[in-house]
Image: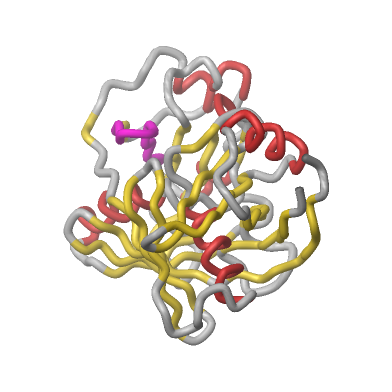
Amino acid sequence: MSMRIFQVDAFASEPFGGNPAVVCLVEAPREADWMQRVARETQAPATAFVVRAEHGFDLRWFTSAAELQLCGHGTLASAHVLWETGEVRGDQAIDFHTRGGALTARRSSETIEIELPASVDEPAAAPDGLADALGAEPIYVGRSRFDYLVELGDEAALRALRPDFQKLARVKTRGVIVTSRPTTAGVDFVSRFFAPSVGINEDHVTGSAHCCLAPFWSRRLGKARLTARQLSVRGGALSLTVDGDRVRLGGRAVTVIRGEWTAS
């Protein structure tokens, strides 16, 4: 079979920044095992599979090791490709049907905004081995439906983290979000995200983590609109709006590769 594929840098305005995602435009639904094998072949932080459905598009995401229940940057990249290729008119919203729920994407000028379910954390005891694996003592630990949320005392401590990923993979969670107040100018908070249990030691820019971070910092700062930066090597910027039980994530995207998948 033939399938159009695209590599997109999400939450970036130029190549080599943000978080790469491979987007596959699939003619008809395929088996999970086949999609997992494609994701292992691409080795992208997320490989998204988009197939037209009766009301919008079905969307699934895989890392090289596992299927994801929610993926912000893979959703933003998929919407970018659908508009760029003319599959959807630029002035039309896109409805995605996913295992993480119904998601919507809209475009305004060059910015894409995706609406995702909020994932509010609750205060939690730090699991055994977490502080040792991170190499830092949290000042707060919370638990969302996907991840642990760890707050550190300052941005310097966040930047200095060098986790032991073998130890971190033993913590029973999808991933660990680590955040702090910023010294970086122009943002409300900064973060990093580690998910060795699903094959990603450190993610570049994690939209789904900000579904937890946005409500957390909205409560702390008393504001619904926030700006954030993820402090990975590539880095990425996000605009965020907390709206009840939803979070709207805004960012840009750029296509860096277009091609055709020819293997069956």
Q: Residue at x 51, y 41 (%)?
A: 193
Q: Is residue 86 at all visible to an observer of this figure?
A: yes
Side (left or right) of 41 relative to 251: right
Q: Is residue 188 at all visible to an observer of this figure?
A: no
Q: How is the image coloured?
A: secondary structure
Number of marks: 0
On whether residue 114 falls in the magenta region, the answer is no
Q: Residue at x 49, y 50 (%)?
A: 59
Q: Residue at x 59, y 40 (%)?
A: 30
Segment tinted magenta in the rendering:
142-152
- Where's the C terminus, which quadrant? top right
Q: Residue at x 81, y 42 (%)?
A: 263
- Quarter holding residue 244: bottom left
Residue 210, image x, y percentages: 39, 52
Residue 177, image x, y percentages: 44, 39
> Of residues 225 and 184, which is closer to you in this image?
225
Q: Is residue 51 above or below residue 258?
A: above
> Of residues 95 and 20, which is closer to you in this image?
95
Q: Is residue 54 above or below residue 34?
A: below
Residue 100, image x, y percentages: 36, 43
> Of residues 31 and 97, which is closer to you in this image?
31
* Main secondary structure found in the magenta portion: strand
Residue 93, image x, y percentages: 39, 74
Side (left or right) of 47 relative to 194: right
Side (left or right) of 140 relative to 47: left
